[in-house]
Amino acid sequence: MDIHSKIYQDLTRVLVTREEIAASIKKLGQQITNDYQGKDLVVVCILKGACIFFTDLIREIDLPLTTEFMSVSSYGSGTSSTGVVRIVKDLDRNIEKKNVLIVEDIVDSGRTLSYLVSVLNQRHPSSIRIATLLDKPARRVVDLQVQYSCFNIPDAFVVGYGLDYDEKYRNLPDIGILSPKIYESAD
Ligand code: 5GP
């Protein structure tokens, strides 16, 4: 999709281009490949936002990994989460004694992942780490260790490359700041 397409008119601007995303994921994949040599790795995709990042990332990890999918719904208003999380779809397999890598689209307050890590830790994995495409460190309200991150971004609501607003914009190949008039008019 071209940045002149109509859907791009809802953005204030493009924040991270598809080329920057691809280069960063390649580097991250190499780092994860080095870090997990000889280990049993389960890569967990948090649906739906992380799906595009996940499919690109696992193809840059040169290890015999397995994949799992988890879907959580966080209760909150249109553009923020509360940390009250419901598991909509759980993992299919046991993660006991496995090295779990959670793949998330964006860490904002950190509440969603903090909850997920505590839930998964009760299943006795060997380790749990987090890989996120985007991080908004200025918004963090809980202490959360994020081991792998592609981009730190400012406090703005972004869409594209898997990230949605009202289930739309996930198919944008780039990441952009959504024009506030789109969600303000919905309030
Ligand atoms: P947290 O619990 O860290 O505050 O929120 C994490 C979740 O909030 C993300 O998985 C994502 O669903 C949503 N989120 C936070 N910031 C943004 C953003 O800028 N854009 C979009 N599309 N979702 C966001």
Image: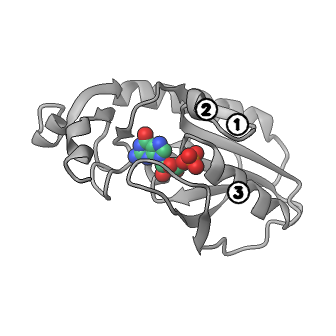
Find residue 14 and report its image quarter.
top left
Task: Measure how far apart labels 3 and 2 are at the Cα level.
Answer: 19 Å
Task: Measure how far apart labels 2 and 1 are at the Cα level.
Answer: 7 Å
Which one is closest to the eye, mark 3 or mark 1? 3
Say which label, 3 or 1, has the lower sequence index.
3
For the residues labelled 2 and 1, say whether their Cβ atoms are less than 8 Å apart.
Answer: yes
**Residue 182 versus residue 96 in the image, above or below:** above
Residue under pointer 2: 149
Task: Measure how far apart labels 3 and 1 are at the Cα level.
Answer: 14 Å
- The answer to whether residue 106 is left or right of residue 66 is left
Residue under pointer 3: 115
* Three-letter residue code for mark 2: Ser
Check disc 1 and report its element: helix, strand or loop.
Answer: loop
> Residue at point 64% right, 49% down?
111
* Three-letter residue code for mark 1: Val
**Residue 154 versus residue 125 in the image, above or below:** above
User: By what rule are the colours in the image chosen?
Assistant: one colour
Find residue 147 and report its image quarter.
top right
Q: Is residue 21 visible?
A: yes
Q: Could you say which disc has been placed on residue 146 in the image?
A: 1
Mark 1 close to ligand 1, CB under 8 Å: no
